[in-house]
Every structure is written in structure tokens, then in C-alpha cells.
């Protein structure tokens, strides 16, 4: 006679399976919670891995988390993102350059991002940019308000302290990349840039000032014009030679960027109303150099003024590839203008001293 196992009622079977399902879910939840608690509390390493990352404004948290996981700083990018969402801080994380190690708990990393404890807050000063352009960039990157920065640029007490003769620090803000992580005062930033300028000046150019026939302010002013006119760096000594030749002949420099300084950013074609506008900087309207720089030149432009090419050029006109055609005579220059500017915008402007055409 075969033993017959009693059959479990269907309802009891369902209850039994449901009970085991609940137990399984609970076990999984406990394991998950334990893993999550471990993830938050214990870093994946002992500090041997150091990672510097750029978290740009508008960048995704996932991209950052994936990069940190790949480098070994985070154990799980997925749990890191989950934590940020759970805490409701995904929209509060601050852009900047951060330094993390694998000895940092993820909660600490998230806290640094939320508080904006950046390792570096880099700001690049492009060659040739004016204080007005820099002010717009600084405000756009939420570093300093434009008006506050410009106020420091023309601070009489600061100018006296720095030994700058002029109404602003224009020309002396050395083009380079600066770390503004611990700087919340625009005066400190201005001092950083000018300190770097004087360091380079004393190392490379101070000994050449006397033989140039120009003083420092004049050298920097002319260099700022050369910087604005030049597209190809190798042409800077040629452009400098043109302006120096014209200065010796007492010819107006007639440089397009000077007509726009303090009015609008130099970009695109210079219009007739620009070159007819009377300003202290417009070299279509004044003889000689402007009263001060129109931007902040780099080393190449300053060197070009101090070591210009030896030429007989008095004119140049922009070609279509970013370079210029240089001419010694007005007739040659007019032929070049017809060749390179014909049918493009306004004809070259001419006054009693004829025209020098810069970038168009």
C-alpha cells in the first residue's frame, strides 16, 4: 500500500508561497539596505587614488558619477545618483573643479559638491581681451559682478599702489589661466593679474624699453592694438612695424579696433559710423597712440613692438584666410583692397592720410 501525502489546500498553498515571497523581498531589502549603508559609510579605498574632475555648469551628474566610478573613487555611480536624488540636492550641486580620493565616503563627496568646496575655479584671460570683455566673462561665469570688477579696474588707490599711470588697469591684466577658488574679492584678482604682468615684464622686456624709444605705457598701448589686429601670431612683428613706421611719419594709425574701444566689442566688420565716431581712442580721429591700451596683450604682441620686423610697410589689409597683405605704397594698398575687399561690405575708408585697413 502506497503512502499518500495529504494534499495542501490551494488557498493554503498560495498563502505559503506569498509568505515566502514576502520573506524573500524582506531579505533582499535588508541586503540592499545594508549594501547601501555600507556604500554611504565606507569609502572604496585608502586614499591611493586621487582624482581631479571638472564639473562644468550644466553638466550631468551621471557623467560625473560614472567618471568617479571608473577611476575607483566611487563604488557605484548608480547608488551615488540615488543618494543625490533621495536628499533632493541634484539641482544644488555647484560647478567647479574638484579633487576627490577613494578614501572619501560618497556622502562627503556629495557634500563637497553641494557646498561648492572646489579644488580649482579656473578662469582664463584671453590675449587681447579688454577689461569690459573680461567683466562680461566674469559675470557670465558667476565669479564677479561686471560693475564691481570694472570699479576695481579703475580704482585710483589701487592704480597708485600698482604704479600704473592711467585711468584703468587696462593693458596690465596678464593673459593666463588663474585659480579663483579662494578669491571672492575682485581687487585680489586684479592684483594677481597685474603681478603676473610685472613679473613677465621685468624678466623679459624691461631691459628693452629704453632702446625702443617708447615708454612702458606706450609699448603696452601699441601692443594691445597689435594683439587686436593680428589673427596669425607670426604676423605680429609685421603689424607692429607698420604702426611704428606710421608713427615715425606722423601718420594716423587708423586701426579699426581703436574705433570701437569702450563702445562695443571688436567683432566683425567695422562700420563707417564707427570710424567717424569721435572718441579719445579712435585713431581715425586722433594722431599718434591712444591715451592708453585697448586690451590686455600677451607676450607675443609686446615682443613684436619691442622687436618689430624691419619693413617699409605702411598699410595692410585682411585677406580671406586670416592673414594680411602688407603694402609699402598707397597704390599697392588700394589694389590689395580691391582684390580682397571688393564686394564685401563698405569700401575702405580714406581720409587725408589715406587708409590702413586692419581686420575686416
Image (tube, rainbow, N blue to C red):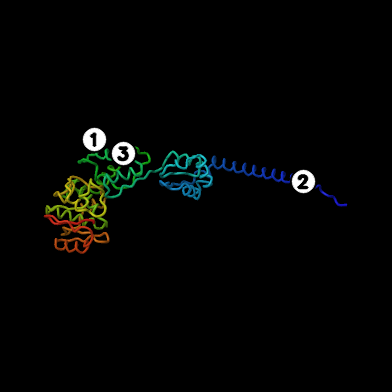
Name which quarter of the figure residue 325 lies in. bottom left
Distance CA(mark 3)–CA(mark 1): 14 Å
Tell me residue 160's x, y (percent).
22, 37
Say which of marks 2 and 1 sits in front: 2
Tell me residue 304's x, y (percent).
22, 53
Residue to which mark 2 is pinned:
9
Q: Residues within 10 Å of mark 3 (few under 14, many from 20)?
A: many
Between residue 137 and residue 186, name the one nearer to us. Answer: 137
Q: Earlier in the sequence, mark 3 or mark 2?
A: 2
Distance CA(mark 2)–CA(mark 1): 95 Å
Q: Earlier in the sequence, mark 2 or mark 1?
A: 2
Give above or below for 117 relative to 329: above
Tell whether 14 sits left or right of 345: right
Check disc 3 and report its element: helix, strand or loop: helix
Q: How many labels does the image show?
A: 3
Between residue 6 and residue 174, name the one nearer to us. Answer: 6
Between residue 168 and residue 60, name the one nearer to us. Answer: 60
Check contact, mark 3 vs mark 2: CB within 8 A: no
Tell me residue 352's x, y (percent).
11, 55
Tell whether 242 sits left or right of 139: left
Say which of marks 3 and 2 sits in front: 2
Residue to which mark 3 is pinned:
186
Q: How crowded is mark 2: few (under 14 residues within 10 Å), some or many (20 or more)?
A: few
Q: Which of marks 3 and 1 is nearer the N terminus?
A: 1
Residue to which mark 1 is pinned:
157
Say the numbered circle drawn on residue 201. Answer: none
Check disc 2 and report its element: helix, strand or loop: loop
Q: Quadrant of the C terminus?
A: bottom left
Amino acid at each position: 500500500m502506497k503512502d499518500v501525502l495529504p494534499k495542501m489546500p490551494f488557498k493554503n498553498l498560495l498563502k505559503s508561497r506569498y509568505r515566502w515571497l514576502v520573506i524573500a523581498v524582506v531579505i533582499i531589502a535588508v541586503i540592499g539596505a545594508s549594501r547601501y549603508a555600507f556604500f554611504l559609510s565606507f569609502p572604496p579605498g585608502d586614499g591611493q587614488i586621487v582624482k581631479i574632475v571638472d564639473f562644468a555648469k550644466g553638466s550631468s551628474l551621471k557623467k560625473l558619477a560614472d567618471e568617479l566610478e571608473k577611476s575607483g573613487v566611487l563604488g557605484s555611480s548608480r547608488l551615488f545618483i540615488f543618494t543625490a536624488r533621495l536628499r533632493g540636492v541634484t539641482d544644488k550641486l555647484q560647478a567647479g573643479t574638484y579633487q576627490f580620493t577613494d578614501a572619501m565616503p560618497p556622502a562627503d563627496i556629495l557634500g563637497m559638491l553641494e557646498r561648492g568646496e572646489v579644488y580649482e575655479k579656473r578662469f582664463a584671460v584671453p590675449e587681447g581681451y579688454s577689461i569690459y570683455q573680461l567683466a562680461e566673462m566674469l559675470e557670465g561665469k558667476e565669479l564677479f559682478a561686471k560693475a564691481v570688477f570694472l570699479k576695481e579696474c579703475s580704482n585710483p588707490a589701487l592704480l597708485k599702489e600698482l604704479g600704473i599711470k592711467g585711468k584703468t588697469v587696462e593693458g596690465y591684466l596678464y593673459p593666463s589661466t588663474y585659480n579663483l577658488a579662494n578669491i571672492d574679492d575682485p581687487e585680489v584678482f586684479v592684483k594677481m593679474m597685474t603681478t603676473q604682468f610685472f613679473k613677465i615684464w621685468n624678466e623679459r622686456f624691461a631691459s628693452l624699453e629704453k632702446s625702443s624709444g617708447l615708454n612702458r605705457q606706450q609699448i603696452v598701448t601699441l601692443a594691445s592694438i597689435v594683439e587686436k589686429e593680428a589673427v596669425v601670431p607670426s604676423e605680429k612683428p609685421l603689424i607692429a612695424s607698420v604702426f611704428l613706421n606710421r608713427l615715425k611719419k606722423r601718420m594716423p594709425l587708423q586701426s579699426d579696433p581703436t574705433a570701437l574701444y569702450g563702445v562695443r566689442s571688436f567683432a566683425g566688420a567695422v562700420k563707417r559710423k564707427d570710424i567717424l565716431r569721435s572718441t579719445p581712442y579712435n585713431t581715425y580721429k586722433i594722431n599718434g597712440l591712444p591715451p592708453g591700451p585697448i586690451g590686455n596683450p600677451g607676450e607675443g604682441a609686446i615682443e613684436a613692438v619691442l622687436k618689430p620686423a624691419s619693413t617699409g610697410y605702411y598699410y595692410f589689409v585682411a585677406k580671406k584666410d586670416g592673414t594680411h597683405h602688407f603694402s609699402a605704397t598707397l597704390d599697392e594698398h588700394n589694389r590689395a583692397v580691391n582684390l580682397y575687399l571688393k564686394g564685401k561690405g563698405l569700401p575702405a575708408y580714406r581720409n587725408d592720410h589715406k587708409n590702413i585697413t586692419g581686420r575686416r
